[in-house]
Image (spheres, rainbow, N blue to C red):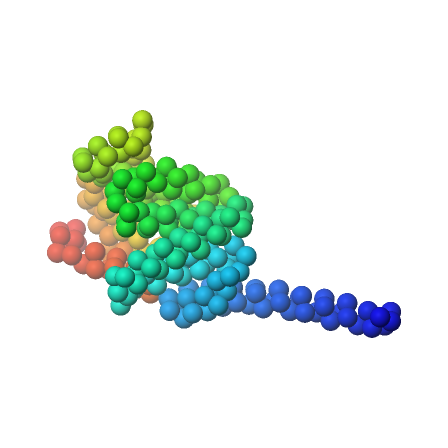
């Protein structure tokens, strides 16, 4: 190989590498745009082409995309289950590829919780400390991620309202079963709202529900009204609207 040929080869190789990086970044930007628009199916179709990627940035987005697709009302029960486990596999792989990625920790926690819905209350409660641990790691890596803070609040709310028989299961699994209060849940939901105001319809809903459980009707009505009036872009937004339009909500209007 002549020096000139080698120089040409080196420059072409460098250009190809840069272009590949640009293309990957463009795909991620397109994915984030589709997510912001609520284009769940188009987003999944885009990202699934990169399912064999070793990049955690693709993998956690795939986990989120598969989970969002599973939440669509048009999805069959069997397909919902398949997508739920698929989402968990992507989240697990993202975490294996990059332990320093806050979103990988967050989506691993979310997807692990979802899988528990199919594996029984014992498994779901058994995973609870692991879920909280990964949420706390996500927040430590990115204290400005309101979603991770919200989910930690949801974790607290779920254990605050745990039924008596579920508490017995937890006591069998753990020497010190997980516990939480509505006050703790409320603090996380308020913190999430402080970090990123009006970022998520479900955070507004959970603020309302937390105040209801604490018998603060006035503040409950305020946050439930905000949740009801939140623009319905995603499937979750639509579900929140249904919850805030129940007959029992009218007593707060």
Q: Nearer the viewer, residue 3 or 104?
A: 3
Question: Can residue 49 be seen here?
Answer: yes
x 32%, y 38%: residue? 126
Q: Residue at x 21, y 32 (%)?
A: 168
Q: Position of residue 14 (x, y in %)?
A: 72, 66
User: On the picture, is 26 further left or further right than 184?
Assistant: right
Q: Residue at x 34, y 47 (%)?
A: 113
User: In which image quadrant can residue 7 be found?
Assistant: bottom right
Residue 209, how many percent across, how many down? 23, 46
For residue 196, say whether it is visible.
no
For image coordinates 77% across by 70% down, the residue present is 9
Q: Residue most toward the right?
A: 3
Image quadrant containing the N terminus: bottom right
Where residue 158 sits, quadrant-wise, is top left
Question: Which image quarter holds the C terminus?
Answer: bottom left
Position of residue 73 relative to residue 243, above or below, is: below
């Amino acid at each position: 190989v002549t020096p000139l040929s080698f120089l040409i080869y080196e420059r072409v190789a460098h250009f190809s590498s840069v272009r590949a990086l640009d293309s990957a970044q463009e795909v991620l930007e397109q994915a984030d745009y589709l997510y912001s628009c609520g284009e769940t199916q188009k987003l999944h179709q885009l990202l699934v082409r990169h399912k064999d990627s070793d990049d955690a940035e693709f993998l956690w987005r795939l986990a989120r995309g598969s989970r969002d697709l599973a939440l669509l009302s048009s999805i069959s029960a069997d397909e919902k289950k398949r997508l739920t486990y698929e989402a968990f596999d992507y989240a697990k792989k993202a975490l294996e590829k990059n332990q320093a990625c806050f979103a990988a920790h967050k989506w691993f926690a979310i997807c692990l919780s979802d899988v528990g819905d199919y594996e029984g209350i014992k498994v779901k409660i058994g995973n609870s400390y692991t879920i909280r641990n990964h949420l706390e790691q996500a927040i430590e890596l990115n204290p400005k991620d309101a979603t991770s803070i919200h989910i930690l609040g949801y974790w607290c709310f779920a254990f605050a309202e745990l039924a008596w028989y579920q508490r017995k299961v937890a006591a069998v699994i753990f020497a010190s079963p997980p516990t939480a209060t509505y006050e703790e849940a409320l603090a996380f939901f308020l913190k999430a709202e402080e970090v990123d105001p009006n970022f998520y319809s479900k955070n507004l809903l959970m603020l309302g529900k937390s105040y209801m459980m604490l018998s603060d009707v006035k503040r409950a009505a305020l946050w439930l009204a905000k949740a009801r009036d939140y623009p319905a872009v995603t499937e979750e937004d639509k579900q929140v609207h249904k919850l805030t339009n129940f007959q029992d909500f009218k007593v707060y209007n």
